[in-house]
Image: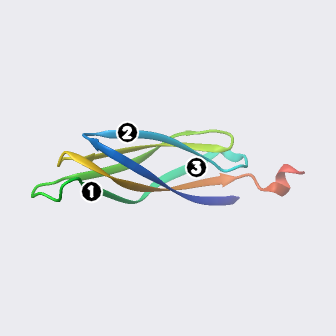
C-alpha cells in the first residue's frame, strides 16, 4: 500500500447562486483497485460587498470517478448573500501501486 495525498485549491470565480465545478487530479501512477477518496479541507466564500445578517455559506466535495491514474471530484458551493467569490481546498487521497510491484 502506498497512500499518496494531494491538496488542490480551486478558485471560485465571482458568481451568484449555486456553483458546481468538476476537476481531476493526476497522480502519475496507477491507482490500486481504483481506491481513492476526497475530503473538504478548507473553504472561504466571501460576499462581494461585505457580510449581511442571515448569510449562509455552503461548500462540499464529492468523489466522481477514479481512473487508472487520476481522481475526479465535484465541488458544490453556494452563498445565500448573492454575489460571492474565493476558494475551496480539497484533499485527495489515493492508494497507488508501488513502483517495485510494477517492475515485478
Mark 2 closeness class: few <14, some 14–19, many ≥20 residues within 10 Å: few
Q: Which residue is mark 2?
A: 20
Question: At x 70% / y 58%, what residue is drawn?
Answer: 1
Furthest-front residue in this view:
49
Q: Earlier in the sequence, mark 2 or mark 3?
A: 2
Residue of label 3: 36
Residue 94 spot, x, y in % from top left: 61, 53
Q: Residue at x 28, y 51 (%)?
A: 58
Q: Residue at x 81, y 55 (%)?
A: 99
Q: Position of residue 9 (x, y in %)?
A: 47, 56
Which quadrant of the figure has residue 54?
A: bottom left
Q: Residues within 10 Å of mark 1 (few under 14, many from 20)?
A: some
Viewer-closest of 62 and 87: 87
Q: Where does residue 11 sit, x and y in percent of width and height?
A: 42, 51
Coordinates of residue 12 in the picture (x, y in percent): 37, 48
Q: Residue 62 or 14: which is nearer the viewer?
A: 14
Determine which residue is flagged by label 1.
46
Nearer to me, 102 or 47 = 47
Gap between marks 1 and 3, in whole Å?
30 Å
Circle 1 sits in a helix, a strand or a loop, which is it? strand
Amino acid at each position: 500500500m502506498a497512500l499518496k495525498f494531494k491538496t488542490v485549491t480551486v478558485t471560485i470565480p465571482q458568481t451568484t447562486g449555486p456553483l458546481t465545478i468538476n476537476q481531476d487530479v493526476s497522480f502519475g501512477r496507477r491507482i490500486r483497485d481504483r481506491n481513492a477518496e476526497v475530503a473538504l479541507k478548507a473553504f472561504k466564500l466571501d460576499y462581494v460587498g461585505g457580510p449581511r445578517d442571515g448569510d449562509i455559506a455552503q461548500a462540499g466535495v464529492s468523489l466522481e470517478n477514479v481512473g487508472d491514474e487520476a481522481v475526479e471530484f465535484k465541488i458544490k458551493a453556494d452563498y445565500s448573500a448573492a454575489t460571492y467569490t474565493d476558494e475551496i481546498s480539497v484533499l485527495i487521497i489515493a492508494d497507488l501501486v508501488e513502483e517495485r510491484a510494477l517492475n515485478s
